[in-house]
Amino acid sequence: MKQFLKILSLVVVVMMACSLLIQSAEAQCKYQHEKKIIMGFSQIGAESAWRAANTDSIKAEAEKRKDCFELKFSDAQQKQENQIKAIRSFIAQGVDVIAFSPVVESGWEPVLQEAKKAGIPVILSDRAVDVQDESLWVTFMGSDFVEEGRRSAKWLVENYEKVKREDKSMDEVNIVELVGTVGSAPANDRYEGFREVLKDYPNFKILATQSADFTRAGGKQVMEAFLKAHGDKIDVVYGHNDDSALGAIQAIEEAGFKPGKDIIIVSIDAVRGAFEAMVEGKLNCTVECSPLLGPQMFDAAEDLMQGKKIPRRIVTQEGVFPMEVAEEVLPTRKY
Ligand code: AHR
């Protein structure tokens, strides 16, 4: 019995040591830093499943690198003024690096000048800013939103004939568009990219376009209004994000139509909810926009603190997922 207990406690000690080793391997920072890097991050809010996954990615990475980072996370609740306040507070606290995902493109020059004056480098994560002085930020990582708009339109023009209801005509395809947050980079760029492709297909017409603010509630509300105004004239919904399309699906069902059949739906993000809707035959295609930006954001901050040169633009590689592949791909989705 004594011998058995001895072996058992040895096994437990070995297992604990292994688990500690695994944890510390996971928690490794890129370099050894003399002191912790203090990063201030201003998040837009929690408008969509995408945004929640983006926040999780950033917080999880901060936790993994807690030996060399202290993250000051601030939620702006969708307001630019709150982001500006947060950035000013990071400057006042003397953080080492500021990162943020700007809710809209314009209006950042003064506060970013203040960060520059204080010698604090700024990382743009997910969305770009529109500033004259390009030295106000060091790197911008995230998706190519114009390309996402193009991909949505390409999928539509190449597949509409195949997926449409048999009695629907190809002579005039009427699209309604659920735009993202007004003035935001993804809304501006997805609007532009979609039209860039459609201009060569005059039978594809944009019947109505309105902001749904990247939210489910917005998507439902705007779609209700579109249905009231245009009814069964609507052939296609183009959602600037999956959440707004999922809200629109609800409105379409409540109006007695079949989403994915009577009305074809294409949207952007590729969140799990979109895959679930595709498995149920209610959404036709989702164009990927990855929110998993945490690891590269912290890598960039570590490189900066080491005085390393980092790329000005880091573009996320992404795919397009039509309904046919949804069942197979869904179990592999990370967000
Ligand atoms: O900036 C990325 C966009 O913001 C996502 O497509 C949308 O879902 C989010 O709210």
Image: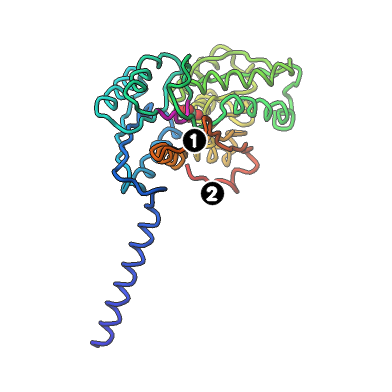
Residues 137 and 326: in front is: 137
Sequence order check: which comes first, mark 2 or mark 1?
1
Q: Quadrant of the N terminus?
A: bottom left
Residues 49 and 91: in front is: 91
Please name the amino acid that badge 2 sits on.
Answer: Thr
Residue 198 got which mark? none
Q: Residue 268 placed where, x, y %?
A: 55, 30
Q: From this view, report whether residue 210 is shown above or below residue 270.
A: above
Residues 42 and 239: in front is: 42
For residue 145, which quarter of the picture? top right
* Any part of residue 246 in sight: no
- Side (left or right) of 252 relative to 112: right
- Side (left or right) of 146 relative to 108: right
Residue 310 got which mark? 1
Describe the element under mark 2 as helix, strand or loop.
helix
**Residues in magenta, as a range:** 122-127
Q: Residue 182 placed where, x, y %?
A: 47, 16
Describe the element under mark 1 as helix, strand or loop.
loop
Q: Residue at x 35, y 43 (%)?
A: 62
Q: From this view, report whether residue 332 is shown above or below residue 40.
A: below
* Any part of residue 143 in sight: yes
Q: Residue 245 placed where, x, y %?
A: 53, 27
Look at the magenta stretch and give its main secondary structure. strand
Confirm whether the magenta stretch covers residue 124: yes
Q: How did the renderer colour the structure?
A: rainbow
Residue 332 got which mark? 2
Please name the amino acid that badge 1 sits on.
Answer: Ile
